[in-house]
């Protein structure tokens, strides 16, 4: 029979982890962001919810990684789509600001309610977009009424003007002053 005996010695915690100056320290450490996680990324700006026919709508995208860090470089490939229940479809575009942000643009011409889709990979963000009519265009306005062809001196004559913009959208917002 062989007998083994061990003697245990208590080791002080200060011996377990000692700080030693490494050669070349202190070291500079650069921590980069992870790849874009579009589910954490943000889209913002008034162009997500309201636009005017004939004027470019725009909004911003801030790409963020899975840890919530804002990305600081570009390179993501987005898609921007605008569509209505009436079957109107627009393709938007975007510009890479090379700092983790992007500017998306689209150009609506017909008033109405649309869905605006921003897509990166398999992730899609959606917002409801209201496109209002553009500025009034006199050559597209319609006039109605008997007073356009007949009138009697001393009596008021009235007629109706249907204001429209340059895309033939009926003006339903703003002032329509006629002189």
Image (spheres, grey):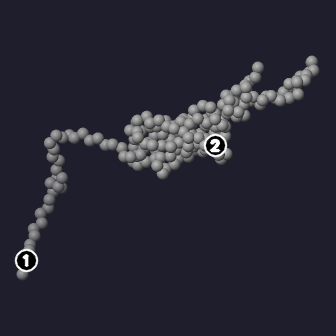
Q: How many marks?
A: 2
Quadrant, the C terminus: top right
The front one of 152 and 22 is: 152
Quadrant, the N terminus: bottom left
Q: Secondary structure at mark 2?
A: loop
- For marks 2 and 1, the one nearer the N-term is 1
Residue labelled with disc 1: 3
Q: Residue at x 50, y 46 (%)?
A: 119
The image position of residue 51, as x and y in percent, is: 61, 35
Q: Which quadrant of the figure has residue 98?
A: top left
User: In the visual, does 152 lie left or right of 19?
Assistant: right
- Front disc: 2 or 1: 2
Q: Residue at x 91, y 22 (%)?
A: 151
The front one of 43 and 107 is: 107
The front one of 34 and 109 is: 109
Residue 16 visible at all: yes
Q: Residue furthest bottom?
A: 1
The reply to whether callout 2 and callout 1 are in contact (CB within 8 Å) is: no
Residue labelled with disc 2: 88
Q: Residue at x 10, y 70 (%)?
A: 6
Q: Residue furthest top?
A: 153
User: In the visual, does 149 lie left or right of 106?
Assistant: right
Find the distance from the CA under tag 2 to the CA under tag 1. Answer: 90 Å
């Amino acid at each position: 029979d062989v007998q083994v005996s061990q003697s245990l010695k208590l080791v002080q915690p200060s011996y377990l982890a000692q700080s030693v100056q490494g050669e070349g320290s202190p070291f500079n450490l650069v921590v980069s962001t992870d790849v874009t996680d579009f589910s954490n990324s943000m889209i913002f700006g008034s162009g997500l919810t309201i636009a005017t026919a004939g004027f470019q709508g725009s909004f911003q995208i801030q790409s963020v990684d899975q840890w919530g860090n804002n990305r600081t470089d570009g390179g993501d490939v987005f898609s921007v789509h605008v569509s209505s229940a009436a079957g109107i479809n627009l393709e938007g575009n975007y510009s890479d600001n090379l700092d983790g942000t992007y500017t998306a643009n689209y150009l609506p011409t017909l008033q109405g309610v649309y869905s605006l889709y921003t897509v990166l990979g398999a992730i899609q963000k959606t917002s409801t977009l209201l496109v209002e009519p553009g500025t009034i265009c006199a050559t597209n306005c319609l006039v109605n009424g008997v007073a356009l062809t007949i009138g009697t001196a001393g009596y008021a004559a009235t007629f109706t003007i249907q204001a429209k913009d340059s895309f033939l959208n009926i003006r339903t917002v703003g002032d329509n002053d006629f002189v």
